[in-house]
């Protein structure tokens, strides 16, 4: 009986290890974001039911999820030494599955994503092939470079939305304004992550913005990004019909001001982790606030 319990415990640990490596919670949020963006922003003229039951869209979102899971795996593989310094507990959990098995899973996930994307079109295959290469090249080379690494990471983070954006072929200006706001928030998050991981980056010779320029210039750069983020917020609230989502952006301004105040008082890794979580909250809240654009119509279309 004890042997069975031990095996069950090991299986459970391996499941949590895999879930931690591929950041299952992040992938779930991205899937929800892609569907909500499709319903309310990218294809507002289609019914929610039609969008949710669209097989091609489902395949694109599934392929995106597989590529992102693979991306987290390869990123974790290249960052394993650094993460052991910065996040020892999480890294120990991630290593319950051998590196060989996790790399095999990486290749399987990427292959599957390309195979299922072929059901939609050759363009989809090309798109995901380039996306896979971009993630690998970032993890292997670009991540260690200041500015280029941060810029590439932010671009790769919003790339999943380009998959559905291209699918619907909607080039409305409001989409680019939303994307600009998200891009700037992710850009802030990348610099905060560099500040949070300063110890491991220094130990392993990474050339991040805080290491090359210093902590103070990095904070000034974050301050500039906060200032730039106010511009798309202003445009979305005053020039576009975003329904009750404008309350989300009002709240975002308040949170960004609190965030900015905390940036200049932050010194330790724990402080930067708090800042990271504030930005993560803004991103996640933004996903679900898409419902506020027209929640009555959304419920009416489904039910």
Image (cartoon, rainbow, N blue to C red):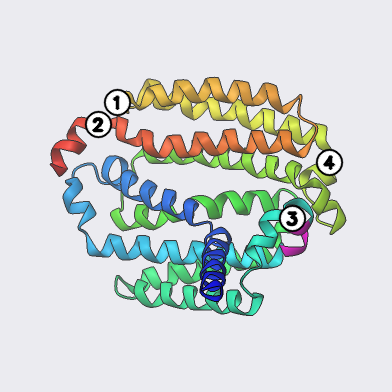
The residue wearing badge 3 is: 88
Q: Earlier in the sequence, mark 4 or mark 2?
A: 4
Say which residue label 2 marks.
Answer: 294
Residue at 38% across, 53% down: 31
Task: Find numbered disc 2 in the image and state the secondary structure of the residue it sits on.
Answer: loop
Q: Quick check: marks 3 and 1 in contact, CB under 8 Å?
A: no
* Sooner in the amino-acid sequence: mark 3 or mark 2: 3
Say few, some or many: other residues with alpha carbon within 10 Å of mark 1 (under 14 / 14 to 19 / 20 or more): some
- Front-most of residues 81 and 248: 81
> In what element is the residue under mark 3?
helix
Looking at marks 4 and 1 on the same chain, the residue that comes earlier in the sequence is marked by 4
Residue depicted at x 49% and y 38%: 283
Instruction: Judge left or right: residue 125 versus residue 103.
Output: left
Q: Of the residues under marks 3 and 1, which one precedes in the sequence?
A: 3
Q: Which of the pair 7/265 is nearer the observer?
A: 7
User: Is residue 241 visible in this depiction of the protein?
Assistant: no
Vertical placement of 127 versus 167: above or below?
below
- Spatial CA distance of label 4 from label 1 is 42 Å
Q: Name the residue under label 4.
A: 213
140 part of magenta stretch: no
Q: How far apart are marks 1 and 2 (CA)?
A: 6 Å
Q: Give the range drawn in magenta.
A: 80-84
Q: Is mark 1 on a helix, strand or loop?
A: helix
Is residue 4 toward the left or the right of residue 262 in the image? left
Dot 4: what SS? Answer: loop
Quadrant where the image shows the C terminus: top left
Q: Nearer the viewer, mark 4 or mark 2?
A: 2
Q: Distance between the residues labelled 3 and 2?
A: 44 Å
In the picture of the structure, the residue carrying the numbered disc 1 is 243
């Amino acid at each position: 009986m004890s042997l069975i319990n031990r095996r069950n415990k090991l299986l459970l640990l391996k499941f949590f290890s895999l879930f931690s490596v591929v950041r299952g919670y992040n992938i779930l949020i991205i899937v929800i974001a892609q569907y909500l963006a499709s319903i309310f922003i990218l294809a507002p003229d289609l019914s929610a039911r039609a969008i949710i039951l669209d097989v091609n869209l489902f395949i694109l979102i599934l392929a995106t999820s597989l590529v992102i899971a693979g991306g987290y795996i390869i990123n974790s593989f290249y960052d394993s030494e650094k993460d052991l310094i910065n996040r020892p507990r999480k890294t120990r959990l991630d290593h319950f599955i051998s590196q060989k098995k996790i790399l095999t899973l990486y290749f399987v996930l990427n292959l599957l994503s390309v195979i299922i994307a072929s059901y939609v079109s050759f363009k989809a295959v090309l798109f995901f092939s380039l996306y896979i290469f971009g993630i690998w090249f970032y993890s292997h080379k670009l991540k260690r470079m200041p500015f280029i690494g941060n810029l590439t990471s932010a671009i790769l983070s919003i790339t999943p939305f380009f998959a559905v954006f291209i699918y619907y072929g909607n080039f409305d200006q409001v989409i680019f304004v939303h994307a600009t706001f998200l891009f700037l928030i992710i850009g802030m998050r990348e610099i905060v992550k560099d500040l949070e991981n300063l110890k491991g980056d220094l130990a392993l010779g990474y050339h991040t913005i805080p290491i090359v320029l210093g902590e103070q210039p990095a904070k000034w750069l974050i301050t500039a990004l906060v200032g730039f983020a106010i511009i798309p917020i202003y445009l979305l609230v005053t020039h576009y019909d975003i329904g009750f989502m404008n309350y989300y952006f009002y709240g975002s301004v308040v949170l960004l001001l609190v965030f900015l105040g905390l940036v200049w008082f932050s010194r330790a890794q724990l402080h930067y982790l708090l800042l990271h979580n504030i930005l993560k909250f803004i991103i996640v809240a933004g996903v679900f606030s898409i419902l506020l654009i027209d929640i009555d119509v959304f419920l009416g279309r489904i039910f």
